[in-house]
Structures are given as C-alpha cells and as structure tokens.
C-alpha cells in the first residue's frame, strides 16, 4: 500500500501563514473558515497581495502542522519501512522539503521523497506506483479516481461544500432528503451543501476498497484507517 501525501493543507498549516500575511497587509480578519475552495481569489484580493502572501509562506523556515500529522506519519514510516512520499503542487520543492524536515520529528526526520512542481500530480502518482493520495484540494479528485487511484480527502474548511464524485455506495444514500443532508452538514440546508461522500474509517459496514474515495476528519481517523488496512484490525506496530 503506497500512500502519497499532499503537503499544503494536509500536513502543513500553510493557509494560516498565508492568511496572517494577507490580514496584516490588508487589515482584514480572514480565517480558514472563510474559504470555500483552495483558491483565494474569490476573497477579492489582488494578485500581487496573493503572490506576496504565498511567497511569504514558501520562505518560512518552519510551518506548524495539523494535529497528529507528525505522529501518524512517523508510524506509517516505521510500519512501511519506506521513505514517506510527498507530492506537492509547489514549484519550488526545496521549500516544501525544508519545512517538512523542520517538523518536530522524534528523534530525527524520516527519509522522505518530495516530488511535484509545476507538472500535474497524476504523473508523479503513476511514476511512484501510488495506491492512494491524501489530498485537501478537490480540484482533481475525479481524475484521480477515474485513473484508478484511491483518494483520502482530508476534511478542511475549504472542501466542506465541494461537490465531489459520487460512488456506488453513495447512490444508496437518499440525497434528495434535505433534512438528512442538513444533519450531515451541521444543519446547513442551503443549495451548495457538501456531499460527505466516501467511507469514514471504522464507521462504514463496508471496508475501503482500492481506488475509492475516503474522507478523513483529521490524522487520527487516517491512522485508524491505516491500521485497519495494514493489519486487518488493531494497532499499527
Ligand atoms: Mg493541498
């Protein structure tokens, strides 16, 4: 089972750094909850402000990680015995590598492969023999799934309302029932609600199958899922 991890928005809280910078120069008070996609243009920011903010983020020696990321990545590394594979959309891979290595690994950073750049991630996924990519951006989900890759979508504010691919399992769900949908979306019943599709670890009767979409509500859920597919059940050693 080869897993690839996206970097920004999955491991690193890069958006926090970007928004802090934007808020500082524009006197706004944006938070990740204001985002409905992985794209800041709808916030009405001009391109130079955005570019500066992103460059500011790239230039950081270290960036905070999402809770559990370092611990779970370390376990996956120990379990698999292979370098961790990161595939990023960043053009400058060294900025990503530096920030990944600067995370509080114990005792030292794991071996890692950082790939990506301005080419399409699918090429790298094919080249590396990836089975599943953990992503936060819904932009290419359908293509990944159509190409036979599994996708682990990390739930983040900017993908909560995204329309994402429907699988056979989801068709069984009555999506016309707004009450149910509202319940599953924290009471939201407006037209653009998210469809929380894909299995959730430990909560679905059916186990995850290769090539499927699964949603993770954080690294702890990813860990549970990894344990379940690695050993059948129980702990990752
Ligand atoms: Mg990302």
Image (spheres, grey):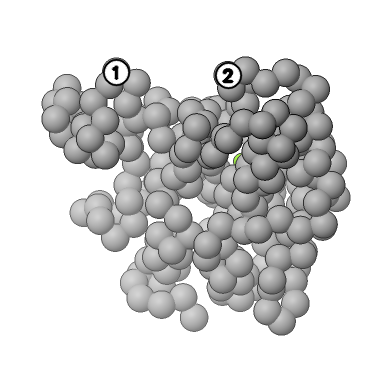
- Name the residue tied to disc 2: 42
Decide: is 64 above or below 123.
below
Residue 109 appears left or right of 65: right
Who's the residue at 32% across and 26% down the image? 193
Nearest the eye: 217 or 52: 52
Q: Indicate the secondary structure of the residue bearing disc 1.
A: loop
Who's the residue at 32% across and 47% down the image? 199
Q: Indicate the secondary structure of the residue bearing disc 2.
A: helix
Q: Are marks 1 and 2 in contact (CB under 8 Å)?
A: no
Decide: is 82 above or below 13.
below
Residue 40 appears left or right of 146: right
Task: Locate residue 43: give its quadrant.
Answer: top right
Decide: is 201 above or below 80.
above
What percent of the width, then of the height, locates residue 78?
Answer: 61, 75
Quarter of the rendered image showing ligand 1:
top right
Nearest the eye: 217 or 58: 58
- Name the residue tied to disc 1: 191
Decide: is 100 above or below 192.
below
Nearest the eye: 73 or 124: 73
Task: Name the front one of labels 1 and 2.
Answer: 2
Q: How many marks?
A: 2
Q: State how far apart marks 1 and 2 are (Cα).
A: 19 Å
- Binning the other alpha carbons within 10 Å of mark 2 as few (below 14), some (14 to 19) or many (20 upward) gives few
Residue 143 appears left or right of 50: left
Who's the residue at 66% across and 35% down the image? 23
Who's the residue at 48% across and 28% down the image? 36
Nearest the eye: 168 or 109: 109
Farthest residue to the front: give it. 27
What percent of the width, then of the height, locates residue 220?
Answer: 43, 63
What percent of the width, then of the height, locates residue 114?
Answer: 76, 52
């Amino acid at each position: 089972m080869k897993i690839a991890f996206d970097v920004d928005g999955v491991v690193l809280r890069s958006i926090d750094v970007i928004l802090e910078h934007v808020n500082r120069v524009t006197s706004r008070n944006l938070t990740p909850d204001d985002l409905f996609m992985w794209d800041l243009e709808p916030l009405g920011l001009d391109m130079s402000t955005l570019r500066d903010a992103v460059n500011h983020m790239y230039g950081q020696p270290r960036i905070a990680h999402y809770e559990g990321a370092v611990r779970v990545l370390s376990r996956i590394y120990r379990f698999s015995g292979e370098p961790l594979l990161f595939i990023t959309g960043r053009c400058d891979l060294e900025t990503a590598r530096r920030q990944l290595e600067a995370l509080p690994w114990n005792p030292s950073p794991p071996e890692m492969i950082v790939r990506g750049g301005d080419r399409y991630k699918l090429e790298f996924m094919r080249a590396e023999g990836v089975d599943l990519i953990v992503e936060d951006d819904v932009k290419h989900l359908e293509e990944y799934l159509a190409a036979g890759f599994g996708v682990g979508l990390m739930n983040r504010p900017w993908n909560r309302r995204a329309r994402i691919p429907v699988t056979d399992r989801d068709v069984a769900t009555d999506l016309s029932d707004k009450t149910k949908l509202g319940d599953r979306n924290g009471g939201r019943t407006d037209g653009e609600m998210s469809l929380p599709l894909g299995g959730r670890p430990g909560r679905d009767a059916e186990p995850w199958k290769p090539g499927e979409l699964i949603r993770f509500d954080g690294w702890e859920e990813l860990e549970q899922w990894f344990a379940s597919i690695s050993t059948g059940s129980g702990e990752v050693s």
